[in-house]
Amino acid sequence: MPGGGTRPAATAAPEAGVILLDVSRLISRLGQGPLTGIDRVEREWLEALQGRDHRLLARVVRRQLLLGPEAGALLLRWLDAPEAVPMPRGLVAALRRVRTPRAQAEEVLAGMALGTGGTRGFGLGRALRRLPAGSAWLAVGHANLHPGPWRAIAPLRKAVMIHDTIPLDFPEYTRAGQDAAFGRRLAAALTRADLILTVSEATRADVIRCRDRFDIAARPEIVAAPIGTTLAEPRPDEIPPDLPRDRPFFIALGTIEPRKNHALLLDAWERLGPEPPRLLILGRRGWENAAVFARLDALPHRGPVIERAGLSDGAVAALMGEARALLMPSHAEGFGMPLAEAAARGLPVLATPLPAAREVLGSHATWLDADDPGAWATEIARLAAAPPRREPVAMRPWRAHVAQIMRLLGQPEEDGGQPGCPAG
């Protein structure tokens, strides 16, 4: 070499870590019908990881499974077509008469596992130690925030997403005992995680308030990472033919549970006179909502208010294209995915002025009080009388959400937009 020197030894590039995505929630939802909000976030993350090296962690019956990337591709296929889950083979499987998609999937995935452990995580440590340095566990759903896995994943960077603190702030809108169970999981995350992700700035403020209320000394980084918006392709052919659309109609989208405040909409419709527009209540029945269920059961067949569950994403997208507005009189929300989807489609929105909702939509909504059915009836009548102008709003894409979190976890990803929402 010139100058008589020697070539310095090449320095090996540091080994890149991988994301260990927890998919316990998605597996539990197999065969249970359309995905709910948090389910969809977990699925979006699983889709985002396709094509790049990653691992999956899943809490199934009596064990924890460490899975490779091929398991994620299968899980996505099964979510779209639960009937495609193959029946486990062998005498034991036949004797156990495994029938549900979830049980079948768990048996198949167990046979593919890179490592297994008990529900408390014992036995997984060796397999997890083989992950590249810099790997991180990402828990988007809360199905595996039990004491067990924390021990096994201790060497990894740990990130937990919190969608809201509704069980603690509004226990009257949740199942009995959910406030205590959620409180334990949140406290564990705040104590043991390295990074807390929230879906909005409003939820971030709520998490900090809960941390201080619990008097937790640990101080993991708490970062707002607003989720993105994906628009399903409208499929008018998937709208049930018996769903009446012969007059102007409005949509309420989501699980029929107390905090969604369907009672206000029923009250508003009673004020709309003898020829009201239609209200399509799209979502499955939830819990602790007997009074609303009784009112729905008493509705006349093919009357102005129609309840329907189990519609495909394509059918809902097509209905959004025809509706006069999305109605969301919620008492509490952590983000409100239907709000973002409606705005992205240019569908007018009537909603309560919750902090998270305002953060998502800004001025792109009409804000109405959650306890004033008269005001809702007035605005609904106005929109029914004249088709509103549609002005799509540019919402944050999922790739921007994913890129932000990848950077936080030390895995740079091409950015898709700024961290705020709306994007435009």
Image (cartoon, helix red, strand yellow):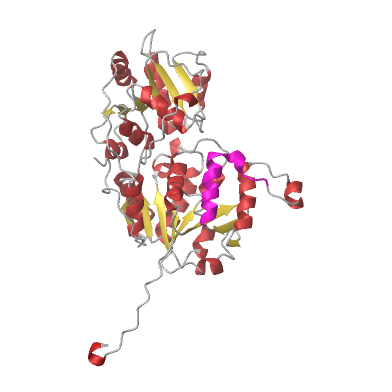
Work out which quarter of the rendered image holds the N terminus and state it. Answer: bottom left
Q: Position of residue 94 (x, y in %)?
A: 75, 47
For this rendering, which residue is in front, 364 or 105?
105
Give the main secondary structure, helix, strand or loop, of the magenta stretch. Answer: helix
Magenta part of the protein: which range? 69-87
Residue sitting farthest toward the front = 2
Residue 395 falls left or right of residue 142: left
In the rendered image, the quadrant that contains the C terminus is top left
Residue 281 screen position, x and y as percent: 45, 24
Q: Is residue 66 above or below residue 358?
A: below
Taking depth in this image into account, of 152 and 374 the one nearest to the observer is 152
397 in magenta: no
Which residue is depicted at the point 51% across and 19% down? 241
Toward which corner of the image does residue 132 lie, by quadrant?
Answer: bottom left
The reply to whether residue 349 is visible in this rendering is yes
Q: Is residue 225 above or below residue 366?
A: below
Residue 17 position, x and y percent, is 42, 65
- In the picture as drawn, the residue positioned furthest to the top comes out as 274
**Where does residue 169 sit, x and y in percent of width and height?**
39, 42
Image side of residue 186 versus residue 93, left or right: left
Q: Is residue 292 visible?
A: no
Indicate yes or no whether the magenta region holds residue 70. Answer: yes
Classify 378 as above or below 178.
above
- Residue depicted at x 73% and y 44%: 97
